[in-house]
Image (cartoon, helix red, strand yellow):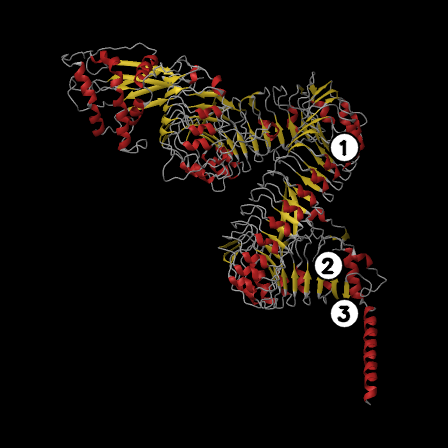
Amino acid sequence: MNQYLPLFIAFCLFFISQSQTTSNTSSQQRCLPDQSSALLQLRKEFVEKRIYSEEYFPFDYYNGSYPKMKSWKADSDCCSSWDGVTCDAHYGHVIGLDLSNSWLCGPLNSNSTLFRLRHLRKLNLALNNFSSSTTIPSEFGQLVRLTHLNLSRSFLHGRIPSEISWLSNLVSLDLSFNYFQYFVAADYHYKNLKLRRIDLEALVQNMTYLRELHLDEVNISSSLPQSLANLSSLTSLSLRYCNLLGEFPSDIFLLPKIQAIDVSGNHNLTGFLPNFRSGSSLKQLRLSYTNFSGELLDAIGNLKSLNFLDLSQTYFSRELPNSIGNLESLSHLDLSGAIFLGLLPNSISNLKSLSHLDLSGANFSGELLNSIDNLKSLSHLDLSGANFFGELPNSIGNLKSLSHLGLSGANFLGELPSSIGKLESLNALYLDSTNFSGKLPDSIGNLNSLNYLELSYSKFSGEIPPSIGNLSQLTYLSLYRSNFHGQLSSTLGNLAKLTSLDLRHSLFSGKVPSSLGNLTQLEVLLLSNNNFEGRFPVSLTNITKLTRIDISGNQLEGSIPSEISRLTNLSSLDLSQNSLTGAIPSVLYTMPSLSVLYLYQNQLTGPLQFQNISSSQLNALDLGGNKLNGPIPRSISNFTKLQGLYLSSINLKDKMELNIFFQVKELQYLDLSGNNLLVSKGNINSTHPKFSGLYLSSCNLHEFPNFLKAQNELYALDLSNNKIEGKIPKWFWNVGKGTLQFLNLSFNHLSSFEQPLKVLPESLVYFFASNNNLTGKIPRLICNVNFLQVLDISNNQLNGYIPQCLGHLSSSLSVLNMRNNCFQGNLPNSFIQGCSLLTLDFSHNQIQGKIPPSLVQCRMLEVLNLGNNNINDAFPFWVQSLPELRILVLRANGFHGPIWTPHTRFGFSKLHVIDLSHNNFSGRLPLEYFKTWNAMLMVPAKDNSQLEYMGSQNNYYKDSITVVNKGIEIFMVKILTIFTAIDLSNNWFYGEIPNSVGNLKGLIVLNLSNNRFMGHVPSSLGNLTALESLDLSQNEVSGEIPQQLLRLTFLEYLNLSQNQLVGPIPQGGQFWTFEISSFEGNFGLCGSPLLNKCGNNNETPSYETRQESSIVEGFDWKVVVIGYACGLIIGLVIGYFTTSKRIVCHFMALPICALDISYSIFQARGMKELECKRGPSLFDGIGNGSCNTILNAFWFLAVDMEALSLLRWLATSRAAEDINSDYELIHEIALIRELIPQVDGSVDDLFSIPCAGSTGNSSKTEMKNEFEGSSEFLSSHDFGARLTIKHKIKQSK
């Protein structure tokens, strides 16, 4: 029996197998009619339209897609031959429907036959386009047998119906990455799926079998229910970018079967990682861009199955634990942007399976581990922007599997190690914005697998190594804005697979090598803004795959070769800003693919000829700035696709008729600036093009063109630099209503508005009305323009108060310029958090009060100009904390007090220009005051090919300021980013000039004149090798002029006059170019250019002689001494002399009795007015009016600044901010007393004049004795506001 048993069993198994096969065959042939009918009806509900990944996604999710429903035929069986359909084996019901990636396009309607398939268990409709659906139909809740539902990436939007929670048998739910994109007001908007908190709770409560829950990019906007941690079967939870709030339930991390958690992109989601237990099944953990914080515990090392860990942009603090090295399965680690402290643990080198390591932007300190070469499996390493310092270790060359190395913006110093050439598997190398110095190593040519090399913004020097021509697999090479220079190596022509070459804004010179013509695969060639010369290289016309050529901003000469027509795939050609000559080849207008042609700012000549252009593909044509002649041909109307035409300043002799351009039907952007335009005043034609951008600057217009009335789609309108005068018409504000974003009316003769302006067009983003004659006040409703970014109404005659609500606009405003008007009152005090201001200019007005502290909210502020106002305030120390501040101008106000205190830390790390001149600032400057002014520490490159100006990045606005440079007041229309200046002149600073100023090697202008600086001229000034202007005049600087100043080879202006300098003037260098006026008033100086020669027999004039002489020289008026009765002045001597920008007043006044005395000194025409007014007598209550008993011998002698400083102190109370201590008072009095013996002989006669009505018995000696004793009175008496001195500064008109 046993011998037949195996045979019997085999027979039974064969019988069962055959029975099953027969059953399956039978079931596949049975398609229930209602099921087949429902599916055929479903097919009719959609159209088939392929979705391309470039339209919606950066990844090709649609690769391999096809219309599955095409196989659905009525005469075939749905269960056996229809793609995507699965039937029940026993009953023929459709239980599975996979129509993912099937080109379905149309709405999911609530009456769809889909919902008649009640036996469905698995439904996959992902990767289709249901964007026309208003929402997900609630009828999905009727498919209660569903275990798998996937509607991801199908462009669904609206609220997820609560009926979804009825699907209690679901094991997998995927509604992720759905959104609807639409375009409104020149911007894209998105609608996402939304899930209410109550529906989420119901979903979690009912779907107890869930293993996969994927709701990425569903807008939940609430916290997660704790009940989510009860889903014991959950293996995968993905909630990326769901706008989750609150704290993430930490028990979810401890679910027994959980393998993947992704909550990345929820910026407001907080949470902490638990103590992970050993044996956890977690494989993937993604927490990037969340608010997770706390300490990463050692228990992280228990996740032995973890292969993917992303903690980028999180807030875990303290150090990364060493236990991270226990994650033996980890293949992907992303810590980019994390704020872990301390060093990268050595244990990281234990991760033998690690293939992807991203530390970009991480906060780790110290040097990069040498042991990093233990990561033999590493294929992707990104250290971009990391804080590692020191040199990149040579061991980097041992990572033989590395295919991607990112070092962009890293802080590594020194040279790039030559071992980089050992990375034979490397195909992408990012070295942009790095600090590596020296030359690019020749070993770079050993990277035989490299196809992407990024060197833009790098600091490598020298020429490109010829070995770069060995990179035979290279497809992309960028050296944009790098420091490479010299001629291009001909070996670049060996890069046979190169498709993109970008050398823009570098320092290359010479001719463009003809070997570039060998790059037969090249599609993009960008060589703009270098110093290339010679003719256009004809060899480039052999590269037939070229689609874009940009050689603008060079020095190309000669004509444009007609051979360029060979480039049949060329879509963009930019040869602008060169020196090309000759006629424009007419073939350029008819090239089959050319859509963009820029030839502006050359020297092209000849008449414009547009022939046979009806097939032209040109979309944008710019010929501006050339020397063309003849009229504009009417054949220009034959451009059928031209949308942008730019013909500014083309040097036509005749007037240009505007009507010609109205015939170019597709024209949207027209620039005719700089031409003499003839505008017809005829009727408005509705067939005229509706322009988006119209630029008619400098067109000799005298009125607003009438045709603008019909331009209701304008985005940009420029009517600047014309002769339009009078009022702005009422109809003008309807131009581009709702669309106009850029409006420039500056530099005209506009006076006012025909209808009072209540509010600007709400769509405006940039508004320029500067340099007109506009009068009136600014309406408060201007603050309703919510999108305004640039407001420039400078140089008008506007008056009234500045609307306080302008501070609320600071969230959108980047430039607010109201310079040179007649505004008064206080500055807005409502600058809000999130302020986006870059430039704030209220200079040259009549503003009073103080600087609002709320300006500290403007953390992006680069320019703050409040000069030439009536602001009375102490120095705003908080400005030092503004991280982006580059220009600070407070000149010519009433600022007072010190600009430094021990309680404020040094700042101004990005400051380029500071002007505090013509104020009442006082005090000493600490020796290290300038140590943190980092922007002035380095001498900038002055290459003309890279000139940049301060202002908005979009070139709509450039900053401007007034500076005193080389003794002359200059208005800088644009400010070069390399310009630096310090002007502290005309204040009351004293003490030594800080040595730290010598560290500012990039400084160009230094003006410390008209202060009370003393001590020696710092020899460290010789380090300022970029200095062009130095003014230390009108101080008390002593000693010799340092020989180190001979190093200042760029110094064009020097003023050391009116000091106490002695010794020989340095000879040589720039000093030979300076005149006597640079050194006069220093009676101890000798040598050229002074007549006083140095030698053993020459005595150095004493300081006493200098004082006596300077007094005599300083007076232009004769001394007037008048005797009167008590209560009048018995002697008044007024003298003055002028420097380039300042009056120095000499008072010798003998005040008698307790009457008010006013002195006014009027400078010559064009200078300033100084008014000094004395209040109640300094000597009230002393004596009975007799000249003998009053301290009538008290007088002020203001030689230089000492006595004026005392007067200034007397003008304030003892508690005023000007006086910091009694020590300063004593110091001031001592200065006055030191002067008494030096002028004894020159004022004797003053004391011999008797007072009318007195006995005449008071001798000169007695009066002088009384005066000399007055210092005790001064030091003991409280003067509190008994003497006032008012300085009025009037600008010459």
Q: Type of residue at label 2?
A: Ser
Is label 2 in a helix, a strand or a loop?
A: loop
Dot 2 alpha-carbon crowd within 10 angstroms: few under 14, some 14 to 19, many 20 or more: some
Residue 151: quadrant of the picture: bottom right
Q: Horizontally, is 1092 left or right of 324 in the view?
A: left
In primary-sequence order, the first of circles 3 and 2 is 3
Q: Of 777 and 240, which appears nearest the observer?
A: 240
Q: Secondary structure at mark 1?
A: helix
- Which quadrant holds the C terminus? top left
Identify the disc placed on residue 540. Answer: 1
Q: Quadrant of the N terminus?
A: bottom right
Q: Position of residue 469 (x, y in %)?
A: 72, 39
Q: Label 3: which residue?
A: 88
- Please rate how many residues cluster around mark 1, counting C-alpha atoms within 10 Å: few if below 14, some from 14 to 19, many from 20: many
Residue 677 on image: x %, y %: 66, 20
- CB under 8 Å between callouts 1 and 3? no
Q: Are marks 2 and 1 in contact (CB under 8 Å)?
A: no
Between marks 3 and 2, how big is the CA–CA gap?
22 Å
Residue at position x 59%, y 19% from top? 723
Q: Amino acid at mark 3?
A: Asp
Q: CA distance from mark 2 to mark 1?
A: 60 Å
Which amino acid type is marked by label 1?
A: Leu
Residue 283 drawn above or below residue 290? below
Observer-side mark, 1 or 3, equals 1
- Give 145 or 1265, whichever is nearer the viewer: 1265
